[in-house]
Image (cartoon, helix red, strand yellow):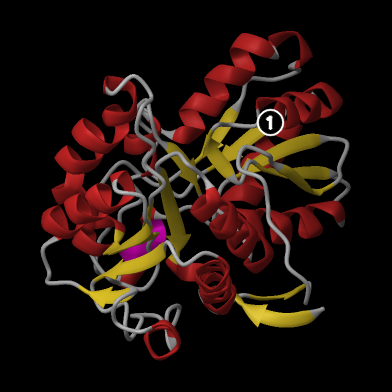
Amino acid sequence: MREVMFVQALGEAMAEEMERDPRVILMGEDVQLGAFGQTRGLVERFGPGRVRNTPLAEVGFTGAGIGAAASGLRPVVNIMMANFLYVTMDQIVNQLAKLRYMSGGQVDFPIVIWATTGAGGSAAAQHSDNPAAMFVNVPGLKIVKPGNPYDVKGLMKSSIRSNSPIIFFEETTLGMMKQPIPDEEYTVPIGKGEVKREGTDITVVAIGCMVSQALSAAEKLEKEGISVEVVDPRTLVPLDKDIILNSVAKTGKVVVCDDAPPLCSVASEISATINEEGFDFLKAPVARVTREHVPVPFSPPMEKFVLPNEEKIINKVKEVAKR
């Protein structure tokens, strides 16, 4: 085992897959440098033919990536900030997600659309969105959102090997997070969640950057006599409903945490799933901890007010635990 940072683990995943399969290529804005260090050194190792900088033209290079996937390559397309995905919606939603079905399954699209997401650094409204739910709403895509270095490496390797289109969200705020990971190769299966902490009184389903905050909150709540089980779905599509429902059957109370706006969100979908398929287990209504439904402010105090955090998780868990 060795300790690595989140961005380092992500870079290792891409390097190992490029080494394993010559069809894997990397393209996007500044990938030869790596905006946050994830792809640093890859162009020296694999050459500009496989690690290619693109113009700031997301529609164009996303379309080029889709065409490369249809032609037999396995591209990883870096959109940099998740907000820039909005300009690629036709390429991803109206083309990529549908072409496999429209071709009667004759063409695979083994492509990973990779973007950093989240807020917390006063990057303001146009660089702080978390649009995962928009893509969860699109049939034909798989959505991955890991919350620690072990999972980001294992899930990126699985995503590159998948024959389905993947939207891979990298949490910006987790970039410096460190964790021991195995020296030997491993993958994490897409569609398989994990119980990050066992508990008996209440389940917290946490997504992406909320996982570490939920775990920290659980430690503090344990000292107050509240035992919290933390469940990380890791993949939003397909969603591991069994691991969530099994935890709800155990505790009877649930708080869903997602750093995203509340309306039509992933937290909403998980809440609805629990109500539809696990209602008999519930001892209290399902609660959510999300962002406020406003654009993320630049002002640090206002940004903090808008975003979910450990304190809000603790308060919501205490509120639900009393019911």
Please provide the residue range marked out in magenta: 301-305
Question: Which residue corresponds to mark 1?
Answer: 254
Indicate whether 150 appears above or below 199: below
Q: Specify the quadrant that holds the C terminus.
A: top right
- Residue 304 forms part of the magenta stretch: yes
Front position in the image: 135 or 73: 73
Question: Dot 1, how many residues are within 10 Å of its Cα: few (below 14), some (14-19), or many (20+)?
Answer: many
**Residue drawn where x is 76% and y is 18% of the image:** 283
Asked if residue 134 shows in the view, the reply is yes
Indicate whether 274 appears above or below 95: above
Q: Specify the quadrant that holds the N terminus.
A: bottom right
Q: Position of residue 275 (x, y in %)?
A: 61, 14
Give, as a three-letter code, the residue at label 1: Val
Q: Where is residue 306 in the image (x, y as percent from the top left)?
A: 37, 54
**Residue drawn where x is 68% and y is 52% of the image:** 188
Q: Position of residue 239 (x, y in %)?
A: 58, 31
Is 144 displayed left or right of 59 in the figure? right
**Residue drawn where x is 18% and y is 50% of the image:** 63
The secondary structure that most of the magenta stretch takes on is helix
Front position in the image: 68 or 179: 68
Where disc 1 sits, the SS reads strand
- Residue 16 forms part of the magenta stretch: no
Is 94 displayed left or right of 321 in the figure? left
**Residue drawn where x is 19% and y is 60% of the image:** 126
